[in-house]
Amino acid sequence: MSQGRPDATNAFNGVMREIRARNDEQYDPREPIRVWTDEDLTPDGVRTSLTAVLNTGGCRWARAGGCTMCGYVAESVPDGEVASEDILAQIDAIAAHEADALDEPAPLVKLYTSGSFLDERELSGATRKAIVERFGDRERVLVESLPEFITADRLDPLAAIGPQIDIAVGLETASDRIRQECINKVFTFEEFAAASEVAADADVGIKAYLLLKPPFLSEREALADAVESVRRCADHAHTVSVNPTNVQQYTLVEDLYHADGYRPPWLWSVASVLERTADTDAIVVSDPVGKGSDRGPHNCGECDDLVARAIEDFDRRQEPAVFDEVDCDCEQTWKEVLDRERSYGMVLDA
């Protein structure tokens, strides 16, 4: 992994370790953090999905300090280690949830670790293989990883099991400067592109996650970065997910939010990114977490549900015309924000 600018990285990590030390919650290592079912657009079409967040002890990078907006490590077992038998007990719990929620097994299984599924410190090779084998009859199994762990020796055993394997990579932005100086994530776009080539050689797909509106960017800067990032990473991923920032606990973004130094992105910005990038070769989707809330992406409060439904409709149909069907007076306010918010320090709102 690239180290970026050591002075900035060390400063971020020190601040975020202090913030995360405020958390004293405990989590059961034999229970997944959460499980749900939904529908997702895949290269094979819309499929019922089973999604779970495994408790693996958390992201290695987050333990060092980590990303400015990510609070997922706060939900992990505090000592950073979960035994293989406990992980497999979580898989049993996930399967039980699916049996209660669905009449038949979901074709798409998405397993998140809030870290890297391919990191040996989180999951051993034997544990990874056992997990994928449990879902060996599915069409697709998606897991997540940082680029540094995407290697042939870790991918090949999984790809040989049966389902199409996809790796979700939290690229966040195509800009190395924004990734390092606003998000505190220190790999480069070149490393992401190289990992995607390794995945392609193993017949493994890549799904890229982008962050809309990291801290320290104005709304206009964030919108422009997201559009450019979708276009650049579409050459390396079959699906690009645009994730608007939500204010998670025990993060630097939360501290900024409470100091009136951060506003989550407008839902109009999410819609604009999707509309402007609908012509790319990749599938482009967004699932705004916390939509309509003050801590999540939101508009004025009156139109949030309407715009969120249009975004969901776009996710299924990939048709930008869905946004022609929504309007609200606050869209003009959003446009004024884009025009007048010239710097990060000028946080304007509806």
Image: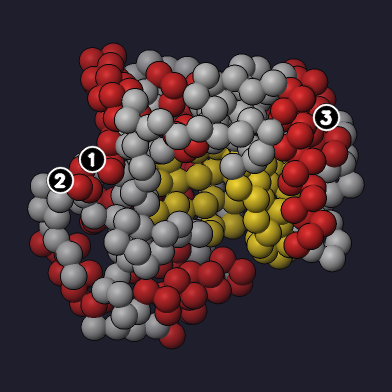
Number of residues whose C-alpha sits closer than 10 Å to that of mark 3, classed few (under 14), some (14–19) or many (20 or more): some
Q: Residue at x 40, y 31 (%)?
A: 24
Instruction: State whether residue 305 is above or below residue 37.
Output: below
Circle 1 sits on which residue? 255
Q: How is the image coloured?
A: secondary structure
Numbered badge on residue 205: none
| Left or right for 337, reference 250 | left
Residue 142 quadrant: top right
Q: Which image quarter holds the C terminus?
A: bottom left
Circle 2 sits on which residue? 259
As measured in the structure, the alpha-carbon distance from the residue carrying label 1 to the one carrying label 3 is 40 Å
- The picture places residue 210, in percent across and down from the top left corner, at 45, 46
Q: Earlier in the sequence, mark 1 or mark 3?
A: 3
Q: Nearer the viewer, residue 23 or 51?
A: 23
Q: Residue at x 77, y 55 (%)?
A: 98
The amino acid type of the residue labelled 3 equals Ala
Number of residues whose C-alpha sits closer than 10 Å to that of mark 2, classed few (under 14), some (14–19) or many (20 or more): few
The amino acid type of the residue labelled 1 equals Asp
As measured in the structure, the alpha-carbon distance from the residue carrying label 1 to the one carrying label 2 is 6 Å
Number of residues whose C-alpha sits closer than 10 Å to that of mark 1, classed few (under 14), some (14–19) or many (20 or more): some
- Check disc 3 and report its element: helix, strand or loop: helix
Q: Nearer the viewer, residue 28 or 171?
A: 28
State yes or no: discs 1 and 3 in contact (Cβ < 8 Å): no
- Check disc 1 and report its element: helix, strand or loop: helix
| Left or right for 72, reference 45 | left
- The picture places residue 13, in percent across and down from the top left corner, at 31, 21
The amino acid type of the residue labelled 2 equals Ala
Q: Residue at x 34, y 49 (%)?
A: 247
Q: Please indicate, yes or no, whether residue 130 appears anywhere in the rendered image.
A: yes
State yes or no: discs 3 and 2 in contact (Cβ < 8 Å): no
State yes or no: discs 1 and 2 in contact (Cβ < 8 Å): yes
Circle 3 sits on which residue? 130
